[in-house]
Structure formats: structure tokens, C-alpha cells
Image: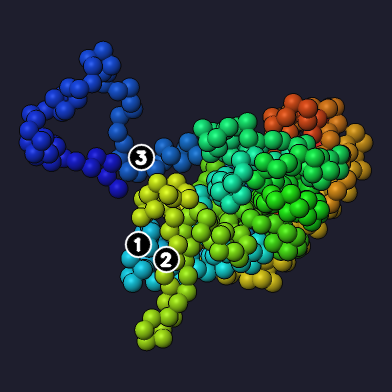
Amino acid sequence: MRYLPHTPEEISEMLQAVGLSSLEELYSAIPKEARLTRPLSMEPSLDEASLMRHLEELAQKNRAGRMLSFLGAGAYEHHFPPAADQLLLRSEFYTAYTPYQPEVSQGTLQVIFEFQTIVSEILGLPIANASMYDGASALAEAVLMARRLTGRERTVLSGGVHPDYVGTVETYVHGIGTGKASLVGVDVGRDGTADAEALTRAIDETTACVVVGYPNFFGVVGDIRKVAEVCHQKGALLITVTLDPYALALLESPGALGADIAVAEGQPLGLPPQYGGPNVGLFACRNDRKYLQQVPGRLVGETVDKHGTRGYVLTLATREQHIRRERATSNICTNSGLCATAVTMRMCMLGKRGFVEAAKQCLAKAEHLKREIARIDGYALPMSAPTFHEFVVKVRGGDAGRLTRALAEQGIIAGLDLGRIDARRRDELLVAVTERHSRADLDRLVAGLAGFTG
């Protein structure tokens, strides 16, 4: 592909069209003192073959791509089949954007409908939408939706919610009502689960919703039924956040446990982690007319035409550039359609049986690794509650940062140093396992931990 899109002749033609004689005239509105008076300090341009060789040389400097990784914390590397990758390159998927004209967008609409169906089945709630950027923005939209539904402002956040998600919520509510002051944090219990008693005490008559992780940021699985009961007794809504939906292949769904709104990160279901994105948010809620009217994003429905032939329509579009304008329930301005398509393809290839089998492998391998680490002198598992495929390790020597740096020299990314999140947890490491890890991979990490001198 050329990187110089305009020839000198084309530039001259465009300048004539706007009545200017040079590019310098075009920039005349920029103060002289703010202009660069010398050429940009750039390397000479390269031909295509030389450029590709240069990029390959740069790529070889990235050691992380060849390292054994146990990093999770909201982004997980599950298997993504090449067949799905190839299907995504088809022009009808790759170039599709937003189905503004449903009569010529039936394929796109059907994919979104299937995506919503998958989300609804995983989260256990009947209404699911599309077009959430990621799990964090889906949570923020859920909090705003809860505020609209209850007419209340306060949000109680369990300490097991991903800190980046909390930051996104803070950004969304900033400038609305009392802003960040409307958010109340409650630490997790000693076993790592959401502290139901502390959350109960934090809920008052101004509380719109309570947000809990399921499983939470520390990988811990707690029974959220009691939290749901207390929320509903006090007129508040329960919102759950799931970082890896593979957990819900084995756990009861949030909807079955009493969640009013459930959100999740869809990246693990079909988007390999790469440079921090792209991601796709999952969002589902109770089947209630009031809820339906407040759902953010878009919702595709199934119907029949006048001949009785099945078709798909854009049932709900609540974004601000549609007809709702200032009454919009969401300011998300684009569509993660290709990401949703990737998730849909991957999940259809995997199927329900494959989904459960992959989750069982994650759980079994994580449990094996937990047992092996617990046997190493100087290491412990500080949180006693059950986990899915991610768990916290208290490290030998009390400095997880030192440990991760030492193991990185051996080509192992041991996990997330939780001291980077909370200084009180500087002796803790968050380790994630997926079905992609082999027995040899687990043994290598155990050997690395055992050999660390602390």
C-alpha cells in the first residue's frame, strides 16, 4: 500500500479549489511561533521489501511474544482457531460497519442477533444488547442505567471489581450529580469474596446499585445470592462483572443468582489479546419493559416480513446520533461489529460442549498449579474461597515485583504484581491459567518460583 496518498498535482488541484496557492497559505492561521521551521527528523523512506525487513527486525526485539505467560487480570489468551480468523477477512464481514439500512444488512443483523443470543445464554438474562466497547464501558453504562431506573445516585462497588473498571465508572459519572462522591468502595472479605455484611451496611435509601465481580478481580468465586437479596430488599439493583465468561460455562449464571444487570468482557471468547485491544463488552438485563427502554447501545430483533419470511431488524437504537439525540441512554458512538462477529464465529465453532470442556481444562490446570505452589516453602494461597482459573499467591520474600523481574529473566511472565494495584498487596501475585497451558508450562512456573531466593 502506498503511504503518500496525494500526488503534487492532486495537492495543487485541491488548493485551487479552496482558493489558495500553497500549503503554507493553508497553515496561515497557525501562529508563526508554533510552526516547525525545519524538516521533520525522520529516517529516509524505504521501498516495500526493505520496510518489511526493517519491521521484522524490530519485531524480533519483542521478547514478550516468546515468553511463557501467566498474566491475566482481565485479558486472557484462550485458543482462537485460524478458521475464524480467515472468515473474518471475508469482505462482507470485514467491511461491514453499522446496519443503518436493515433491508440490505440482513447478514450483519443476523450476526448481531446470534451474538445477543450467545450473551443472553451465558449471562442468564433474557435481554442482551450489542455495541459495548469493552467490559469496563459496559459496566459504566450499567451503572448509569441503574441510576435512571431507580432515580438514585449512589453506587456501592465491591473491592473485587477490576480497578480499571472502577476508574472507567468514575470517569463516566464525573460531572453528573455529586460525581465521584457518589461511588462507595467496600473491601473484599478475608477469604477474597465480596463481603456481604459490609455491602449490606453500605446500602442505604440513596443507593442505586451494588457492583460485584463474579468471579472477581482476584479470581475468587463467591455466592452472590445474599447480596442480591439485600439489594432488592432496599430497592437497589445488583450488577455483576465477569472478566472471563469461560467461568460461566461451569458456574451458575448471574441471572440465576439474582443479578438485575450483568456485564462481562467478551475478549476471551474470540479476540486474542494484542496490544491492549480491541475488546467487546457483553451486556444483559432482566426482561422488564422499564429495563428495555433504558438499555444502552443497540438491540437487534427477529421478525417476519409480509410474506412470512424470517428477517432481522434494528429494534432499539438509543445512541445520541440517532433520533433520541439528547435523550439518548448512551453516548457510545460507534459499533464493535467486527469484534462481535469474531466472538460469534468462535463460540459457534466451539459449541456448548466445547465451551464447557475448555472451562473444565482451565479449572483443572489452575487447581493443579495451586496445589503445587502451596507445597513450595515460603509461598501461600491467602484467599480461601474457590477460584476458577485465576488466583492470588503470597510470594516468598514479600516482594512480588522482585519475583516477576527475576522470572522474566528466565522467559516467564509469572503474573501480575498486585503491588502495582495496591501497595498493601506488594507481596501478592495474581496468576492466570487457561487451556493453552501445558503440564510442562505449569511445571516450569513451579520450578521458577521454587528457585527464587526472595
Residue type, mark 3 in image: Ser
Q: Which mark is residue 281?
A: none
Q: Which residue sits at x=38%, y=58%?
A: 97
Color encoding of the figure: rainbow
**Tag of residue 50:** 3
User: Tag 3: Cα neighbours inside 10 Å, few (<14), some, or many (≥20)?
Assistant: few
What x and y, as percent, mark residue 8?
Answer: 13, 36
Crowding around mark 2 (Cα neighbors within 10 Å: few <14, some 14 to 19, many 20+) is: some
Total marks shown come to: 3
Residue that carries the numbered disc 1 in the rendered image: 100
Of marks 3 and 1, the one in the foreground: 1
Check whether the beta carbons of the residues at disc 2 and disc 3 lie within 8 A of each other.
no
- Compare marks 1 and 2 and give the one earlier in the sequence: 1
Q: Quadrant of residue 362?
A: bottom right
Give the mark nearest the N terminus, 3 or 1: 3
- Mark 1–mark 2 Cα distance, whole angstroms, equals 8 Å
* Residue 142 drawn at (x, y percent): 58, 49
Q: Nearer the viewer, residue 294 or 215?
A: 294
**Which comes sooner in the sequence, label 2 or label 3?**
3
Q: Position of residue 226 (x, y in %)?
A: 81, 53
| 440 versus 81 height, above or below | above
Q: Which residue has dot 2 on it?
A: 314
In the figure, is residue 280 to the left or right of 39? right
Residue in the picture at 42% in, 66% down: 314
Q: Are marks 1 and 2 in contact (CB under 8 Å)?
A: yes
- Judge whether 408 appears above or below 133 on screen: above
